[in-house]
Image (spheres, helix red, strand yellow):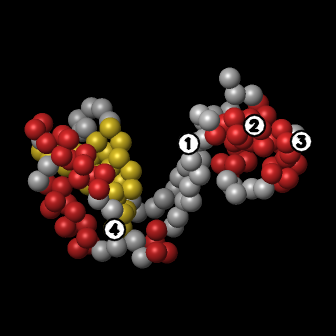
Amino acid sequence: MITKKEIAILKEMRGNARINLVELSNKVGLPVSTVAYKIKKLERGVIKKYVSLMDFSKLGFNIKVICLITPRVEQKSEIISFLLSNKQVNSIYKIDNRYDYLIECIFKTMGDLELFGDQLDNFVTEKEEHFVVENIKTERFLPL
C-alpha cells in the first residue's frame, strides 16, 4: 500500500523528476534518508522509468498524428513488428471497440506522414487519422 507521504513524493517528482533529495525532503517534510529509501521502494514497482517530456516542434517535428487502426487478421503480428520498429511511432495502445490500436506518431514533414500512411495501409483494413493541433495536457495524472 502506498502512503500519503509516498504520494507526496510522487507528486513532486511528477512535476520535476530531477528534483534533488534535499529539496524533495523539504517539500514533503521527511528526512533525506527516508525520502531516498521511499524512492528506492517506489522504483521497485510504481516508478517505471524516468523520461524527458520534449517539445518535438523545437526539434523540427511539427506534425503529431493519432491513428486508430484495425489490422488485417492475418497480419496482426506483422503490424506490431512494423509499429515497434518505426521511428515515427511514439506510443502504441491496444484498445477496444471499433479499432484495435491507437498509435501516436510524430513527423517532420507531410511527406514523412504520407510515406508512413502508405506503409501502414499494407497492414490495415481500417484507419482513421487525427492531427493533434494543440497539446493541452500531458503526463499530469496522479491519483490522490
Whether residue 104 is visible to the viewer of this picture, yes or no, is: yes
For discs 4 and 2, the disc positioned in front in the rendered view: 2
Q: Which mark is residue 48?
A: 1
User: Mark 4 or mark 3: which comes first in sequence?
Assistant: 3
Q: What distance separates the C-alpha of mark 4 from that of mark 3?
A: 45 Å
Residue 57 pos. (x, y %): 46, 72
Comes first in the chain, label 3 or label 1:
3
Find numbered disc 4 in the image and state the secondary structure of the residue it sits on: strand
Q: Is residue 69 above or below residue 51?
A: above
Q: Earlier in the sequence, mark 3 or mark 2?
A: 3
Q: Kindly identify the residue that appears in the image at 40 percent across and 71 percent down.
A: 61
Q: Is residue 94 left or right of residue 8?
A: left
Residue 38 spot, x, y in % from top left: 75, 37
Tag shown at residue 80: none
Q: Position of residue 17 (x, y in %)?
A: 67, 53
Q: Which mark is residue 38?
A: 2
The residue lying at 34 percent from left, 73 percent from top is 108
| Labels 3 & 1 near each other (Cβ < 8 A) | no
Specify the amino acid type for callout 3: Pro
Q: Residues within 10 Å of mark 1 (few under 14, many from 20)?
A: few
Rounded to the nearest whole Å, what is the CA distance between mark 2 and mark 1? 15 Å
In the displayed structure, does residue 90 sit left or right of residue 6?
left
Secondary structure state at the residue bearing disc 3? loop
Residue at image mark 3: 31
Q: Amino acid at mark 1?
A: Lys
In this rendering, is residue 3 above or below 13?
above
Q: Quadrant of the N terminus?
A: top right
Question: What's under tag 2, amino acid-wise?
Answer: Lys
